Image (cartoon, coloured by chain):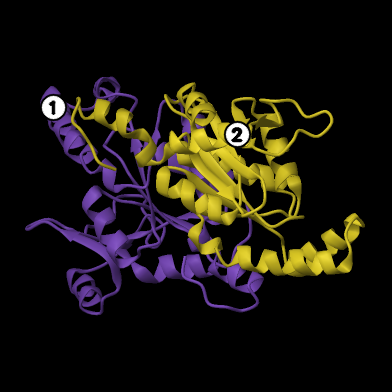
Chain colours: A yellow, B purple
Amino acid sequence: MKQTTAGLLLVVSGPAGVGKGTVDSALMARHPEIKMSVSATTRAPRPGEIDGTHYYFKSLDEFRTMIERDEFLEYMHVFGMNYYGTPKSYVLEQLALGHHVILEIDVQGARKVKQAFPSAVLVFIAPPSMETLKNRLIGRGTETSEAIEIRTQTAYRELEALPEYDYVVVNDSVDAAVDEMESIIRAELCSTAHNKELIENLLGGKNVTC
Amino acid sequence: MKQTTAGLLLVVSGPAGVGKGTVDSALMARHPEIKMSVSATTRAPRPGEIDGTHYYFKSLDEFRTMIERDEFLEYMHVFGMNYYGTPKSYVLEQLALGHHVILEIDVQGARKVKQAFPSAVLVFIAPPSMETLKNRLIGRGTETSEAIEIRTQTAYRELEALPEYDYVVVNDSVDAAVDEMESIIRAELCSTAHNKELIENLLGGKNVTC
């Protein structure tokens, strides 16, 4: 892909079962310059999970200190549950290196990131239909019908936020979805907003507002 | 490319000598579903020019009637010169067929189209540098140094409008520029604004505003 001075921040959301993890992994396999953001959490590591790779594992005190120091792009806390958040440091470091960073977060997190970071590109991975999504959840065979019903209802609520996103990628085939993600990145790298420096150079050093 | 119910209107501008015609032709050679808009003009046909292919050749009266009937997306008239305009009918017909339509027009025309047709995608083809553009014009060997100076000054004025465009494609290599145009089209087909119908279907028929 085109070399630029700064990378893109891609926020990827989508309902459970839509396959966003599969699409993101396939995209990163094609493009090593795309990195997945590592979240911080107060939950205990599960067997095999590595600190700094799967999560940054933090104590409650450490997490709270990070909040006080404004070290999160966004974080989430439901009373009585563990904290989850996106540390700014990793994201900013990678962007400065010219890497693109994917944040796989929910609709509420996406909104917060867009506020804090208006140049973030918001991509929603959607199922071809709600029917397909439900069938995929049933096909997994790991959840009760009640759990599937709850997930489907949650999916509807998430889909209502879709118009707030910049792009919608329908995950019908993983390859086609990855092609579309690739095109979105290439196009965003051509957006005038992302090329202020180039435009200023062409205009002989004038400042521009895109 | 992805099938959608409606095509995209692509406005392509760029200074003389930047190679926008070459890029657009190469793009259309790869994608027969992309059509070039045919302009109307009051100038006389040159040998070999076919009515309805190169231009719609109109008498002054016919052209003025079309203006009165609001049949142009945009038109241009400099006192004492011929009229040039983009008839709406061809563009709307092609878009309805699901074809993408390219309008190769100048900065002022692009502004008018964006007002009349806010979903138009504005692409500016830029040279790698002003130096390169000047050298290309000199390399053609068809123009006087005075004419080249005028074209270069015009190019600077056009480049000042660049921040009003959605995308900038640097024509360093034609193949790379065509790849970028392709990505822009694919990405725009994934934009939430272009997929209201799909989103409404996912939400079970609710109206959405993207």
Q: Around disc 2, counting alpha carbons within 10 Å, would you say few (fewer than 14), some (14 to 19), or many (20 or more)?
A: many
Rendering coords of residue A103 (x, y %): 58, 41
Q: Secondary structure at mark 1?
A: helix
Q: What's under tag 1, amino acid-wise? A: Glu
Q: Around disc 1, counting alpha carbons within 10 Å, would you say few (fewer than 14), some (14 to 19), or many (20 or more)?
A: some
Residue B42 appears in view = no
Is circle 1 on the same chain as circle 2? no
Q: Residue at x 39, y 71 (%)?
A: B89
Judging by the rendered image, the residue that carries numbered circle 1 is B149
Counting labels gives: 2
Rendering coords of residue B168 (x, y %): 37, 39
Q: Is residue B130 left or right of residue A173?
A: left
Disc 1 versus disc 2: distance between alpha carbons? 50 Å
Q: Residue at x 29, y 32 (%)?
A: A199
Judging by the rendered image, the residue that carries numbered circle 2 is A37
Q: Is residue B195 left or right of residue B22?
A: right
In this rendering, the answer to whether A168 lies above or below A145 is: above
In this rendering, the answer to whether A208 lies above or below A96 is: below
Q: Secondary structure at mark 2?
A: loop
Q: Nearer the viewer, residue B93 or B12?
A: B12
Q: Nearer the viewer, residue B197 or B127?
A: B197
Badge number at residue A180: none
Q: What's under tag 2, amino acid-wise? A: Ser
